[in-house]
Image: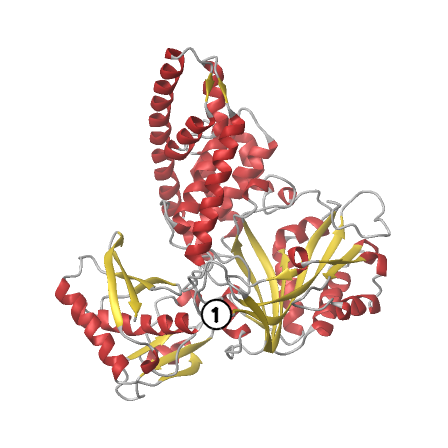
Amino acid sequence: MKAKELRKKYLNFFVSHGHKEIQSAPLVPENDPTVLFTTAGMHPLVPFLLGEKHPAGTRLTNVQKCLRTDDINQVGDNTHNTFFEMLGNWSLGDYFKDEAIKLSWKFLTQELKLNKDKIAVSCFAGDKDCPKDLQSAKIWQSLGIKKERIAFLGKLDNWWGPAGETGPCGPDTEMFYWIGKDKAPKKFDPKNPKWVEIWNDVFMQYNKKRKTKNVNLKIQEYEYVPLKQKNVDTGMGLERTLAVINNKNSIYETELFSPIIDLIKKLSKNYNEKSAKIIADHIRACIFIIADGIEPSNLDQGYVLRRLTRRIIRYANLINITDKKYLEKLTYCVIDNYKDIYPEINKRKKIVDVLEKEEEKFQRCLECGQKEFSKLVNQIRSHNQDKISGRSAFKLYESYGLPIEMIEEMAFEEGLKVDKNEFEKAFQKHQLLSRKGAEKKFKGGLADDSEVVTCYHTTTHLLHQALRKVLGEQVMQCGSNITADRLRFDFKHKEKLSEEEKQKIEEIVNVQIKKALPVTMKEMDLKSAKASGALGFFESKYGKIVKVYTIGPNKGYFSREICGGPHVKNTKELGKFKIISEKSSSSGVRRIKAVLK
C-alpha cells in the first residue's frame, strides 16, 4: 500500500463514520507557546477539547504535519523521526471509549486487514489521579483480544498530556503490532522491540490545573479536574503504519524515504546506513520547517532548524558527500515526493537558498573552530600533555559547532586523546539547563487555556488594530506568542517605532479596554468573513467555516478578525496595557512585547 492510499483510506473511513475532514494545521503553531512546533494533532484543537464549539462539528479527522525533537538521538533506528505525519480522529464530547476502540479495531482489521493474532494493546494501570482503566480492557476483550495480550502500564506509558504544564489530558490505550518473523508470543511484553506501537486512543477526561494561581512558585501543586466534555483524541503514525502493512523492517524502507536514501547512496563516496537515515530524516524536517516561514537562528524554531541543518552537513561530511549541489538535489527529491499532498512546500529556490546559506555559515564556524583547536593543541603540548580536557572539547562544540566526532578525529591526527567522559558530563549538564530553560519559557499558554493567557490573546486583537490606526493599514500580523507573563506580537513594518507612536498605541488599546467593549463570535464561511471586514492573513490555515471575533458593537466595531480563540467576553476583563519592548524581529518585521497590569 502506498502512503497516498493509506491517507485516503484513513480519512474516508472516518468520514463514512460521521467525521468531518479538517486541514492540517501549520507545523509552527500560532499563539501557542507550550511547544515550538505542532507535535500532535490535538494542539490546534485545545480550545475545542476544553468546550468551545468547533465550526466543523463534534467528529473530526485529518492528517497532521508534526515535528518532535525529543527523540533526535534515536533518529536512524527503525522507527524514529523528527518530522512525521499523524493520522487522527477526534470526538469532541460525542462518543467515548466504546466507539473509539471499536472504530480503531475495525480500521486495523477490516480496512488494513492486519492479522488479529499479531495485535496487542496496553491500558492505563491507574494511580491516585485516575482509576485503572478496566473499561477499555473489557472492550478489547469483547473484540477478541486475550487477557495475555493486554498490559496495564503507568502514566509514563499510558497517559497523554497535557501538551504544556496544564490542560486537557487523560489515560490512553495503545495498539501494537508484531513485526517479528517468528510467531507472535502469546503474552504481550511492551519492552520487546518487535512489538511496534502504531495507534494511540487518548481519553481526555481531565483538565490538569494548578492548585494555586502563582506561576512563580518553585514547587507547584496540581489537581486533575474531570472535564465536563469528555473527548477522544487518537493518533496513528503514518510512517510506522506504512512500514507495518508493507512488511518493512524500517520506516526508512518505505516509499516516503527510499528515493532520498537511494539519492544519498549515489552522492556518497563512503556510504553508511545510519548517517543516510539521519540525513534523510533531517532534510525532510528542514524543508517543512522552512516552508512554514522559519529561517535558521539561535532562538526557538530557528535554533531547531539550525541544529537539524548542521547535523545534515556533519553527516554528509562523514559519508564523504562532495557534490556541491547535494542540498539542492536532496531538497528537490523531498519536494517531488510531497508536493501533491502538501503544495505549500513547493518553494524550491527559497528552501535551497536558506539551506545553502546556513551551510556557508557553518563552514565558516568550522574554520574558526579549527583555528581555535590549533591554539588548544599548542597549549597542551607546551604543558607536555597528551589529552584534550572534556571542558575544552565542549567549548569547541558549544562555541564553534564542532561535533565531538570531528574533535576526536582532529585530536587523533595530532596524536592526542579527548576526555570523552568529561565531555559527556558537560554536554548532559548543558542539555539539562536548556531543558529547564525551555520548560520555564514555554510553560502556560493556550494548552492550559488559563484566564491570563485568554486575556493576552484578546489583547493582541486590540494591539493589531491600534498598530494599523497609528502606522497605517499596510501593517499586518506575522505571528504571535503568548505566555502567562506577556504577549509577543510580530507585524510587518520597516521602521523602528518612535516613543510618540508607542504612546499612541498604548493609549488606543487602553481606551478600548476602559470602554468595556463586548467580544462576540460568529461562525461563517471565509468569503463572508472577508466581506464582513474581518482581518485574516493566514488563509492557508483556515477551513471552510471560520470563527470571526468582533470587539465592540456590530456597527462601529473596533476590531474584527478571523481567529480560533480563546477570548474574554468583555474588554473590561483585561487590565492596563503596557508595551515593554519594541525591536526588529527580521527583515521588514517588528516585534512588540507587552504586558497587562
108 vs 402: above or below: below
Q: Quadrant of residue 398?
A: top left
Residue in the image at 24% along x and 65% along y = 579
* Residue 114 visible in image: no
- Side of 13 relative to 590 (left or right): right
208 vs 438: above or below: below
* Residue 571 visible in image: yes
Residue in the image at 44% along x and 81% along y = 523
* Element marked by disc 1: loop
**In the image shown, does 249 or 255 lie closer to the viewer?**
249
Q: Position of residue 136 (x, y in %)?
A: 75, 68
Q: Quadrant of residue 230?
A: bottom right
Of the 4 image quadrants, the one containing the C terminus is bottom left
- Side of 551 relative to 493 (left or right): right
Q: What colouring method underlies this structural image?
A: secondary structure
Residue that label 1 marks: 212
Q: Position of residue 423 (x, y in %)?
A: 49, 30
Total number of numbered discs in the rendering: 1
Q: Position of residue 129 (x, y in %)?
A: 65, 67
Q: Position of residue 141 (x, y in %)?
A: 83, 66
**In the image shown, does 164 or 235 lie closer to the viewer?**
164
User: Dot 1: few (<14), some (14–19), or many (≥20) neighbours within 10 Å?
Assistant: few
Q: Quadrant of residue 401?
A: top left
The amino acid sitting under disc 1 is Thr
